[in-house]
Amino acid sequence: MSQSSVPGQFTVANLQKAYRHRHFTPQDVIEAIIQRAEHARDRNIWILPPTLERIQPFLDRLAQMKPEDCPLWGIPFATKDNIEVASWPVTAACPDYAYVPDRHATVVERLIAAGAIPVGKCNLDQFATGLVGTRSPYGDTHNALRPELISGGSSSGSAIAVASGQAAFALGTDTAGSGRVPAALNNLVGYKPAVGAWPSAGVIPACRSIDCVTVFAHELADTQRVDEVVRGVDVQDPYSVHRPLSRGEMPRTFLLPSNALEFYGPYAIAYEEAWNRKKEAILASGVAVKEIDITMLQEAAALLYEGPLVAERWSDLDEYVEKHGEAVFPVTKTVLESGKKEAFTASALFKAQHRLAEIRRHTATFLEDAVLILPTCGGTWTREQVITNPIETNSKMGLYTNHCNLLDLSAVAIPAGWAEEGLPFGITLFARPEEEANIIVASELLLQQEDVITVAVCGLHLRGMPLESQMTGLGAVFREESLTAPVYEMYALPTTPAKPGLVRTVTGGTSIEVELWDMPRASFGAFTASIPAPLGIGQVELIDGRSVSGFVCEAYAAEGAENISDLGGWRKWIEAGLKLE
């Protein structure tokens, strides 16, 4: 058992399986997370980074808990730093605002009771005001896939902690899209329950009446594992509502916008093409599709920041900002103070609420037994572009998310392919709260449409190697680095050029470094046909228990070949040879 066998990315399933088979322990996982957080300090993920001193009491507690009775036993999670963890300072990304709570937020308390391990507090757009991840005195959080791009916000650090293998899931909050935009920009699932379904006690509010606690994860199933633990009324929380999750059914109708959508930013064309591909896939899937006018949703979205409803943000922070204005991030202060405009009278507020009620009723009607699908984002930006033009760029990010909580909708943001390499595209599914479970069923269908086969490569097809272009030429996209289960040997075959041979052993063996690539199923046949004997494609078992398609070698070819297993991988063998030269 050691950190070396800890996977690069975590899911509840891969951790639980590894714990059962004693591949590693929760202590190993936490120590790996601490190392990763230290190595990624310049990405501004954490406000309170993982340390063993803070986390050890939760690890020690596991010894008194039975894994079979605790659905999240040993699962590490990150927490947005506007959510309270007892005895850990909470800042809402404003150092002067910091205080130390004496109890956990309700959702955190329930997760810990289920065996989950809090590892640290994540960076955010200050006071959860923003969708970009750049509005923090703790630094702008970098995108997990392309650091020059924004992470999305306001739950920026939460998403990046998951995407970079520093948590299995992470709590965020969502008022206007903060639990969904970062998911889309980092190829994650972002689940936003109905307003009030998860208690918000212990959460520093942005707009108290519509705030939601949310979760980021790699897999839809993990968001549901969290939901099962945290959903339910907290009688001490005045906004907590009894909203049980019913059994999900496939929606009768999949709704798509009839309006021409706006795409923006330097990758606008790529985003539009990705949306059109996803629409075509939905239309070809055989589900009943109907196009609807979403103008009213856009009208509701505008009310959140452009009308008197923005006064709710000001109402929770007005006294603090008036007394400590110099401590507030400049663009955040501008947004908050917009809530005190003289034009935003009580009369104007009630008129906005009346119009919102009309739109809410209309939306509930067309969403009956249906699910609405929109792009989560219509584009993205570089961090520099947002810093240069903070208001307009941020506003664009909410075009397809701002309406959601105002209209009392449930939502889940899911990956939907790639706009281009390293640039994920995502969609969001919306449903009425009483049909929230239906978006899970519909999401499972749409995730299956991402018709790719994960391929493990271990030699000339690795990034930077001579045959990488074969992978990219077939439309394959690099996914992650990983290790095989410790049951393989690697040989340097005496070919020209030299090639590795990955051979499964009956006894012994070690873990070998591999890269996982997602290849379109349509390309997979041509790819396998191009591979010469003694190599071929078989099933490769990974360290976390998954089995994926990958390069394997017939055992006879290893006879007389150099066993390079001790080096741990082909790249290291190449590097060793270069050093000898």
Image (cartoon, grey):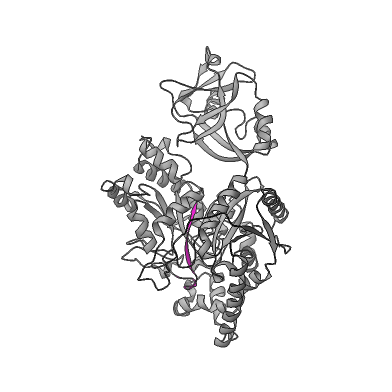
Q: Give above or below for 451 relative to 202.
A: above
Q: Is residue 354 visible?
A: yes
Going 58% across and 81% down the picture, which residue do you hit?
A: 354
Residue 206 is one of the magenta-drawn residues: yes
**In the figure, residue 332 lies in which quadrant?**
bottom right
Q: Give above or below for 455 relative to 497.
A: below
Going 55% across and 60% down the picture, which residue do you hit?
A: 411
Residue 516: percent from left, percent from top: 56, 36
Residue 555: percent from left, percent from top: 52, 17
Give, as a single range, the part of the protein colored magenta: 205-218
Does residue 14 appear to the left or right of 236 in the view shown? Answer: right
Residue 498: percent from left, percent from top: 61, 20
Q: How many marks?
A: 0
Rendered-image quadrant of the N terminus: top left
Does residue 262 appear to the left or right of 187 in the view shown? Answer: right
Front in this rendered view, residue 323 or 392: 392
Residue 525 is one of the magenta-drawn residues: no
Rendered-image quadrant of the C terminus: top right
Q: Give above or below for 556 relative to 212.
A: above
Q: Is residue 581 visible?
A: no
Front in this rendered view, residue 441 or 67: 441
Task: Name the residue at the left extreme.
Answer: 64
Residue 520: percent from left, percent from top: 65, 39
